Amino acid sequence: GSIKPRRGMPMVKHRDFFASLVQLPDGRWIFSGVLNGWPAFQELELRSITTVTSKLGKKSVLRLWQAGEGTAPPVPPDPKHSSVRATLRMPGWSRTSWSGASSGHVWWYFLRDGDPRLEFGNNFIINRIQKDLAGNDVP
């Protein structure tokens, strides 16, 4: 079956997740797909993979893989684990913006020539000022 998109806890089928992993030249592993229909969750760094195990009724977390170990993530993990949890980290620029290309958390949604548009970040503010100075119609 399919996973309901945009759940509170993002989910993805393991084959889609592991097929979307890309190793960077510096050794880090990046999830390059779209996570559960959330378009903002892209270029996430894989930090760890864990699963829950049960022994004599006591549950514990078993770490299957950790970033920095020098090994590739288990693709896919052992089939005896019915589910795994991946810890992912957003890029550093996400602390101050929605895009690496335009910092800032400002946005504006509007129609231009009948087409809906969404502009955001400091580049949007700079473009608006330039249009105002040039006497162009705004937005």
Image (cartoon, helix red, strand yellow):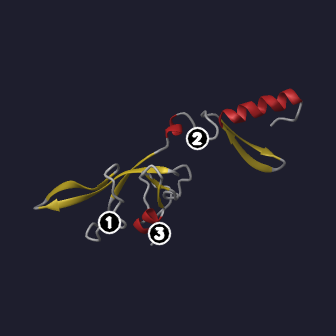
Residue 2, disc: 3
In the rendered image of this protein, does residue 11 appear above or below residue 132?
below
Picture coordinates of residue 118, whole percent (x, y): 70, 44
Amino acid type at image mark 2? Trp
Q: Are there few (<14), some (14-19), or many (20+) residues within 10 Å of tag 2?
A: some
Ranked by sequence position, the earlier of labels 1 and 2 is 1
Q: Residue 77 placed where, x, y %? A: 32, 66
Residue type at tag 3: Ser
Pick the quarter of the image with the C terminus: top right
- Marks 3 and 1: CB-CB under 8 Å? no
Q: For residue 106, which quarter of the picture?
A: top right
Of circles 1 and 2, the one toward us is 1
Q: Which of 54 and 97 is in front in this view?
A: 97
Tag nearer the camera, 3 or 1: 1
Residue found 24% across the figure and 58% down from its top: 52
75 to 114, vertically: above or below: below
| Secondary structure found at label 2 | loop
Camera-nearest residue between 108 and 61: 61
Q: Which mark is residue 130?
A: none
Secondary-structure class at tag 1? loop
x and y percentages locating residue 56 in the rendered image: 10, 62
Q: What is the secondary structure assignment of the residue under circle 3? A: loop
Using the numbered discs, state the Cα–Cα distance from disc 3 to disc 1 in whole angstroms.
Answer: 20 Å
Marks 3/2: CA–CA distance: 28 Å
Q: Give the residue at mark 1.
A: 77
Label 1 vs label 2: CA separation? 32 Å
- Which residue is farthest top? 133
Local crowd at mark 1 within 10 Å, few (<14), some, or many (≥20)? some
Residue at label 2?
98
